[in-house]
Image (cartoon, rainbow, N blue to C red):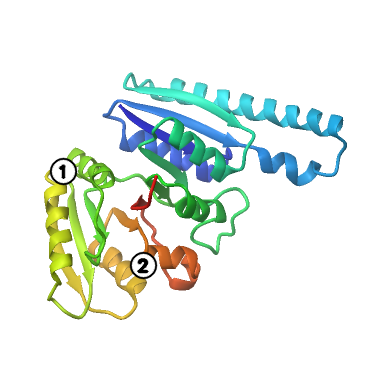
């Protein structure tokens, strides 16, 4: 059984991500955990109150959170009737990242699925701050679903790689399961002006092949200076359904998350974006 964690702020973005999650796993046994973290809703407007008043406001918000989560679960059960799925509501007095990280560890979550933006995110940005924080600090695979993306089976998956990362079987297993389930083609995109690979790269490329036995794996190369441009161009020209990248030390994704912003670099996928973590968990 898959254990899927879906954070929600009850926005349309969050509802859209839930719909995508229920669709992509509709033929698999899955336990969905819907988590609402409400600490910021309490500390933001009420941090200057005396303790008694603060506690009263905290309880009010906690009750609202619990009620909304229960309504969400009831609504899903009423509309889907999927016997393969279990649902659980979790209301947490923590920050979003802490709530997700703690719960992911305690329940050994396989995948986090969330919207790219929340209630307050600008329409001009690609990923809201919460999504980026989860990418950076939660050591669990994260699938971010754009709010305008209509569900489509992931038949064509783009996996950019420089073959410098010693992949982990746990994360590659998730990619292999998705590829096998949908009989998908996985295209490993090498962004370089040169065909030749080092011995290290050849070893990692071979490990990638061995770890994706159920994927229709192919290797492609493009020579271009800007990696984000190369990725976005390939997605558009080849009508890809899912972008998969690995967050690891000294990787392009780490550089994007820590040294700059996604929008400044130009990585703005209009398709779901799966971030796999190659960091200690």
Q: Is residue 116 visible?
A: no
x 30%, y 72%: residue = 230
Task: Tell me which corner region of the image, top left, top right, bottom left or bottom right, holds residue 180.
Answer: top left
Residue 266 x/y as whole percent: 43, 71
- Whether pointer 1 and pointer 2 mark residues with C-beta atoms closer than 8 Å, the reply is no
Element type at marker 1?
Answer: loop
Please tell me in which quadrant of the rendered image residue 249 appears: bottom left
Q: Residue at x 31, y 67 (%)?
A: 231
Q: Residue at x 36, y 51 (%)?
A: 277
**Residue 224 percent coordinates (x, y):** 27, 79
Left or right, 274 with reference to 156: right
For the image, the number of numbered tags is 2
Q: Residue 111's x, y, as percent?
A: 37, 40
Residue 232 position within the rendered picture, expressed as x and y whole percent measured from the top left: 33, 67
Using the rendered image of the protein, determine whether residue 115 is visible from the camera's viewpoint: yes
- In this picture, residue 71 sits left or right of residue 185: right
Q: Around disc 1, counting alpha carbons within 10 Å, would you say few (fewer than 14), some (14 to 19), or many (20 or more)?
A: some
Q: Earlier in the sequence, mark 1 or mark 2?
A: 1
39 or 274, nearer to the observer: 39
Residue at which label 2 appears: 252
> Closest to the observer: 33 or 47?
47
Q: Which residue is at the front of the view, 77 or 94?
A: 94
Above or below for 252 versus 81 = below
Disc 1 and disc 2: Cα gap in Å?
28 Å
Q: Which residue is mark 1?
A: 183
Front disc: 1 or 2: 2
Quadrant holding the N terminus:
top left
The relative height of residue 256 versus residue 179 in the rendered view (above or below) is: below
Categorize mark 2 by other alpha carbons within 10 Å: few (<14), some (14-19), many (20+): some
Quarter of the figure that contains the C terminus: top left
> Mark 2: which secondary structure?
helix
């Amino acid at each position: 059984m898959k254990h899927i964690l879906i954070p929600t702020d009850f926005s349309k973005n969050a509802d859209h991500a839930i719909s995508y999650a229920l669709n992509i796993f509709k033929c698999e046994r899955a336990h969905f955990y819907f988590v609402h973290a409400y600490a910021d809703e309490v500390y933001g407007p009420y941090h200057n109150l005396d303790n008694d008043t603060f506690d009263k406001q905290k309880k009010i918000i906690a009750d609202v959170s619990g009620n909304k989560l229960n309504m969400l679960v009831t609504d899903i059960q009423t509309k889907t009737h999927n016997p393969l799925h279990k649902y659980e509501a979790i209301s947490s007095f923590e920050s979003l990242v802490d709530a997700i990280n703690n719960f992911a560890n305690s329940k050994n979550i396989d995948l986090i699925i969330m919207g790219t933006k929340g209630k307050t995110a600008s329409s001009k940005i690609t990923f809201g701050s919460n999504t980026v924080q989860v990418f950076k600090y939660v050591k669990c695979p994260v699938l971010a679903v754009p709010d305008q993306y209509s569900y489509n089976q992931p038949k064509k998956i783009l996996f950019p790689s420089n073959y410098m990362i010693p992949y982990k079987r746990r994360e590659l297993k998730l990619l292999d399961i998705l590829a096998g389930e949908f009989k998908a083609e996985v295209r490993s995109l090498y962004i370089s002006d040169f065909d030749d690979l080092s011995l290290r790269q050849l070893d990692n490329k071979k490990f990638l092949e061995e770890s994706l036995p159920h994927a229709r794996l192919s290797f492609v190369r493009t020579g271009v200076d800007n990696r984000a441009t190369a990725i976005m161009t390939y997605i558009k020209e080849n009508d890809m359904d899912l972008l998969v990248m690995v967050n690891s030390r000294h990787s392009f994704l780490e550089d994007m998350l820590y040294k700059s912003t996604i929008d400044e670099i130009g990585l703005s996928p209009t398709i779901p974006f799966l971030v796999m973590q190659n960091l200690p968990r």
